[in-house]
Amino acid sequence: MSLEDERPPRPDGEPSPPPDGGVQRARQEADAPREPPEPPPPTPPPDSDPPAYNPQASVEGSVPETVGAVPRTAEAPVDRGRIIAVANQKGGVGKSTTAVNLGAALAESGARVLVVDMDPQGNASTGMGISPQQREITTYQVLAAGLPATRAIMETAVENLFAITSTIDLAGAEIELVSQFSREMRLTRALEGVVETFDYVILDCPPSLGLLTVNSLAAADELIVPIQCEYYALEGLGQLLRNVRLVQQNLNPRLRLTGIVLTMYDSRTKLAEQVVAEVRKYFGGRVYDTLIPRSVRLSEAPGYGQPITTYDPSSKGAQAYLALAAEVAEGPRDFDIPMPTEDMPEVVLPEPTPEMDGEEEREPSEAASRRRRGLFRRKGDES
Ligand code: ATP
Ligand code: MG
């Protein structure tokens, strides 16, 4: 019996991906033509040496709409998938959870989805069930060595969900790329020829505004920002939005802030309600209706290497990400108010009530002292 025969069957009857052969299988699938059939992008034979990176070639190979390294088109080409960056330089707000579970929920609807792990922490890769040992060709080689992205694509256990994984090596790419030509456009170049074979390419960004996030924003059509329903919900958002504007002006005029996702929403707290109201005040129709609940099942799922849609399909978290996927699938909305850029408050605090005032006297915490200073504090306000 071959090794392949011993692998447990997938629910659809296909054998599970081999532990070390995922790259090869995944490349074959990723290169497979969609309807209507298209010729697959050229890839080198699997056992050939990777081509040496040639910065000049990357510019020479640019599409006609680009001048130098800067794309001039404000619209995405119609016949390709949507590239969605999930970014917020604030850590732990639910970026990776959203990238993986939104990706899985879209894949469940039949869409072909590629999740690209742009974070050296590799949380999205783990969340899709791909262990560090299985990650042979990763985002690092694609960005730093110029390997074709098709060689890095791996199958996951979820049908229609594919991954380009990352490892801690990717942390070095930020430094290595600094001196390189067209360093902000590496991911854009790498995704050319790949994005045509997917309906969605979702980029899980790291918690920083460094070169990896800039590469993601430069490549993306859309930006989704997860915001955690907590005191510091809005912290750093002004800075993120200024960077978005810079990328729009200098690298990628297509980029649109299409969605704010409110995460870890706890309906039992008044603060969560106030964060929702405050974020809707600033971002209007850009805020998705779906609120992602705080859920133990969502936090457990990555430990089992599964998105929530397979780990516990009936859970509130799974239902929420399916609802979010339905909203995302409707396409970018018309926005009722312009993207805010400046004067964002840093924190959202509960409106003081008479009862709370009494509590505050007995609660000399930092949060309580902020509450006394008013509903929220703006950048530059006297503290
Ligand atoms: P980083 O900035 O480090 O990349 P992140 O923004 O990607 O973090 P996640 O890794 O998705 O954030 O989430 C941070 C932690 O919160 C994780 O342990 C995750 O399992 C947990 N978490 C995310 N969303 C939820 C949720 N809705 N309910 C409960 N736990 C959640
Ligand atoms: Mg993350």
Image (cartoon, rainbow, N blue to C red):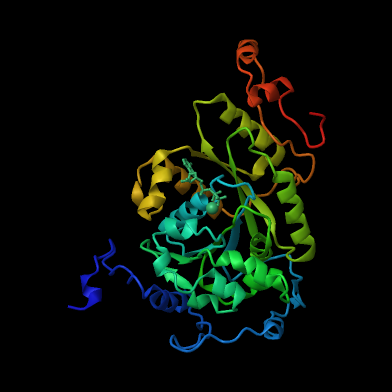
Q: Is residue 149 visible?
A: yes
The residue located at (69%, 64%) in the rendering is 218
Count of numbered marks: 0
Left or right: residue 23 compared with residue 360:
left
Figure check: 366 above or below 53:
above
Figure check: 270 above or below 223:
above
Q: Quadrant of residue 148?
A: bottom right
Figure check: 369 above or below 195:
above
Q: Position of residue 141 (x, y in %)?
A: 55, 75
Q: Position of residue 329 (x, y in %)?
A: 53, 54
Q: Quadrant of residue 82?
A: bottom right
The residue located at (54%, 75%) in the rendering is 149
Q: As rendered, which of 92 and 32 lies closer to the eye?
A: 92
Q: As rendered, which of 305 and 59 lies closer to the eye?
A: 305
Q: Is residue 350 visible?
A: no
The residue located at (43%, 38%) in the rendering is 295
Q: Position of residue 217 (x, y in %)?
A: 67, 61
